[in-house]
Amino acid sequence: MITKKVADALRNQLKNELESSYLYLSMSAWAAGKGLKGFSNWFYVQAKEEMYHFFKFYHYLLDQGEKVELPAVAKPKSEFSSPLEAMRETLQHEQFITKSINELVDVALSEKDHATNAFLQWFISEQVEEEASVGEILDQLELIGENGNGIFMIDKELGQRTFVTPTDLAL
Ligand code: FEO
């Protein structure tokens, strides 16, 4: 059993995760339209990962006997000036998500809710990984600037990313 305060905070995170998925799918579509197949693939995998995050919150709320009502999702931005801009916005977005997860932990701790705190620890580690991997790509993009060959090479590399189907949820 969880308190209303914790449940409301977790329900709010459903929206954050859905909007994350939607944003990255929009970036994927934008990249595909620009012929950047690898970037498109990377954002597509990212969108799927965000849906997985959404489903983790969704099932946790249901497992705790809470009501789940799906939120309205805002229309994401669909135009970007360059892969660099898209990746900068990705990092900013992930920093926002990290902040939201930290705030969720604060709520869980203030309610002495150890189960929710334990549940959230996976997300704490995940955000460290997410920020690090996006930061690495961003560093490369900043290094090469407008260089077409460099973009081509990074695009090839990002095309290798695959979505690893999680085993803890039936998706
Ligand atoms: Fe669901 Fe990228 O954080």
Image (spheres, rainbow, N blue to C red):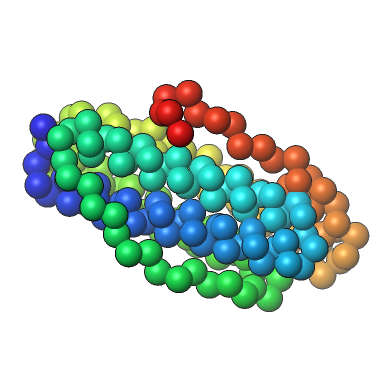
Relative to 10, residue 164 above or below: above
Q: Quick one: quadrant of the N terminus?
A: top left
Count of numbered marks: 0
The residue under the point 68% across, 76% down is: 81
In this rendering, does residue 140 appear at all? no
Query: Which quarter of the figure has residue 2?
Result: top left
- In-image side of 66 versus 52 (left or right): left
In front: 135, or 20? 20
- In-image side of 170 versus 2 (left or right): right
In this rendering, does residue 43 appear at all? yes
Q: Position of residue 68 (x, y in %)?
A: 22, 47
The residue under the point 38% across, 40% down is: 55
Q: Quick one: quadrant of the C terminus?
A: top left
Q: Position of residue 115 (x, y in %)?
A: 20, 29
The residue under the point 59% across, 31% down is: 164
In front: 33, or 105? 33
Q: Where is residue 119 in the image (x, y as percent from the top left)?
A: 29, 32
- In-image side of 171 versus 164 (left or right): left
Query: Which quarter of the figure has residue 138?
Result: bottom right
Q: Where is residue 17 in the image (x, y as percent from the top left)?
A: 40, 52
Which residue is outermost to the right?
149
Which residue is outermost to the top?
167
The residue under the point 85% across, 57% down is: 152
